[in-house]
Each structure stands twice: as C-alpha cells, then as structure tokens.
Amino acid sequence: MSSTLQDLVNRAVFYSTEVQTHFGALIADAEWEVDFSSDPHLTFTSTEGAVLRTRPHLLGSESSREKTWLWGWENVNDFPDAVVGLSHEVRKFGASEDVSELTTPELSLDEELALRLTLASKVATDRWAHYPAAAGAGTTVWLLVDAAEIALPAPQVKVSVRALMQGLTQTTVTDHRAAIEAYVAKRGIPTAELPEGGLRMLFADGSADLSFDDQRRISNCDLNAPLEGEAAEQYAAAEPTGTPAEAAAGSRTTDSTSAPAAKEVAAPPASTPTTPTPAQTEEAAPTESVPDEKPAAEASPAAEAQAAEAAEPADAARGQQQPEDQRPLGDGSVEPAETETPIVEDPSKEAKPKQKKGLFSKLFGR
C-alpha cells in the first residue's frame, strides 16, 4: 500500500514534536560540533562543560542560494557510508511506498520542504530526533540524531497536549485524527472512544478529551488533571498499546522537561534561511489554555515562537538551540483557533535564539 509525503507527515508530526522538545531541552544554549568522518559524531557542550555526544546521520541539505534540497544519498561531497548510509534507507523506503519526494535526488525548495522530508524520514527510519545545522554559504544540513539520552520519559497529559498544539503550528497536518492515532500508538497511550466521534487520551496523571469536526480536525480539547472518575476507571482497565519496545521507552521515568521543538518539528532548528518551520497550514489549530490567561483566538507570532523553539546557527561558525516556553497548560477546555489558517513558521526559523558557536569539521562543497 503506497503512501504520500503528506501521509508520512501526518504520522510523524506529533511524536516528532515531543521528541524535539525533549531534545531541545537537553541541548539548550550548548555549543555544537559535528564530524563527518568514518566515526561521525555531533557533540553538544553546555556552558557548564557538560557534554552530550550523539550519532548524526546526514539526511540531506538545503541551499538558500540554489533554492534546492539535495538528498544525502546523492553524496556529492563523498562522505563515508557511516554518514550517509541511513539516507539510503529513506530512499529505499520511498521506493517501496512510491513516494517520489524520497527518491528524487534534488528537489525545488519551499518553506516547509526540508522539515517535511525530515518528518517522513523519521517514519522510514524510526529515528525521531533531528538537528538542522548551518554549514555556511547558505547551506543547512539536516541530521537525524541518535543518543540514549533522547529517549522520552513516561507520557504526561500536559506534555502530550502541548505536543499536539505545537505540532499543528509546525507544518500542514491534513488529518488531525489520523495524526493523533499514530501518535498514541507510537507513545503507548491508552485511549477511549467518546460520543460523536471524540477520543479520550488516558495518562497516569490525567486525561484529554478531543473533539473533531467533519474534516477530522481537532475542534476542542478538554484537559483534566489529576486522573479521576470515569477516565481513571478506563485507564485502569486499558491494555498497554504500542510495541514492546515502544512501551519500554514510554515507561521510562527519566526526569526531563519539555522545551523546544524542531520546527515542524520541534527540536533544534538551524539556519537563517528557510528551514524547520513550514508555511501556513490550512488547518484550524487549537490553542492551549494557560493559567490566568485567555485562550488565543488565533495563532499569533508569539504563540508560534512558543510552540517550537530550538537552536539556529546563524552561519558556519555559529549554531544554537533554546528550549521553548514551558508554561504549564491549565486544566479544562482548550479551544480551537477561529482562523482556519494558523501561521506556522519555517522549521529553521522557529524561535531564533541567541547565537552559539557551531563547527563543521569537514566543509560542505554544496
């Protein structure tokens, strides 16, 4: 059964947003260095000297000068297989699913493309953290990143609802219901059906009741914490969902906070030109309810900046990330935006943070 690029984006957007937020919190304000040798590594060093060493996989690069995306598997820079090998898996997946965007070496760039291709690549490879890094001369290199520290803690209701709200500001999501179903399956979150086609997400610390319109877009979200009443009974009776590996990852109790998102994503965006935050979406995106604040009637630039914050190196010698606004969500109803076209920022333009040093040990020829 074939897929479209949009199908893959729908499947990836919410889980990716939560991972990027967690990842962004780990590397906030850190300096970074990437090495594309036979032992590739992407290292983040905090101002206190703490080091997070990760394993990068080059997906592709976007050029603001040439206005194109070039897949890593085309490998015009002759990087070793350890660097570009995973991109070949994306190409093979694209061929099996008949997704032409994943099998065409070079594509014309638009505001959302790099992020959307990265989201699709996450579905293809089951790697869920990414980092866009500025390589100089208007080139941004998009990396998938492996590190044990990036594994998510157990699901929490406010963190998950925030991921949904932020995810809708990252890129176009055409089927909110399908996107949520993919997210809860991946995250191992139990659910219960509600009247009129609604869906309840169940957590150890609360629940979220989602309503949808006739176009399968989220029309309302009622967040309830702590877990009690009927929801508590449903949670107690629910069977674990997701694969054993996903359930194991979801059961971790690592202490972490939810912070930035990679544009569309939500983690660390990088590059002054268009990168991680996509163009305007055509969906009505619900907004979060924050204590002592009225829900926004529509997505504002400030809200968008909160939704996805990460680091964005300004040039080849600079790069950074910043966690996003971590204000807690309030219990109760989260009303949808009244506009059907919430403004979404380009993933690489997600909350532009202070500049931090970044370094490529091997320069790009593109």
Image (cartoon, rainbow, N blue to C red):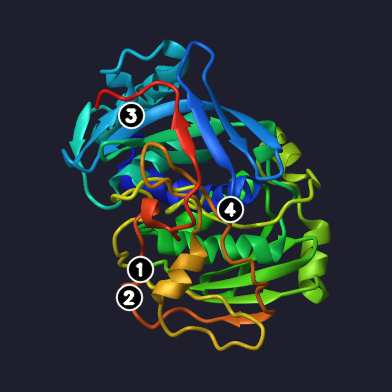
* Residue pointed to by mark 1: 283
Camera-side residue of 113 and 11 = 113
Q: Assign a secondary structure to mark 1.
A: loop
**Identity, as a three-letter code, of the amino acid under mark 3:** Gly
Query: Contact, CB < 8 Å: mark 4 with mark 1?
Result: no
Q: Residues within 10 Å of mark 4 (few under 14, many from 20)?
A: many
**Identity, as a three-letter code, of the amino acid under mark 4:** Thr
Query: Contact, CB < 8 Å: mark 3 with mark 4?
Result: no
**Identity, as a three-letter code, of the amino acid under mark 2:** Glu
* Residue pointed to by mark 4: 21
Q: Residues within 10 Å of mark 2 (few under 14, many from 20)?
A: some
Query: Contact, CB < 8 Å: mark 1 with mark 2?
Result: yes
Tell me which numbered mark, 3 or 1, is placed earlier along the sequence.
3
Q: CA distance from mark 4 to mark 1?
A: 22 Å
Q: Assign a secondary structure to mark 2.
A: loop
Residue shown at 26% from the left, 27% from the top: 103
Query: Contact, CB < 8 Å: mark 3 with mark 2?
Result: no
- Indicate the quadrant containing the N terminus: top left, top right, bottom left or bottom right: top left
Left or right of 58? Residue 45 is right
Q: Is residue 216 visible?
A: yes
Q: CA distance from mark 3 to mark 4?
A: 27 Å
Q: CA distance from mark 3 to mark 1?
A: 26 Å
* Residue pointed to by mark 2: 340
Q: Residues within 10 Å of mark 3 (few under 14, many from 20)?
A: many
| 255 w.r.t. 108: above or below | below
| 124 w.r.t. 22: above or below | above
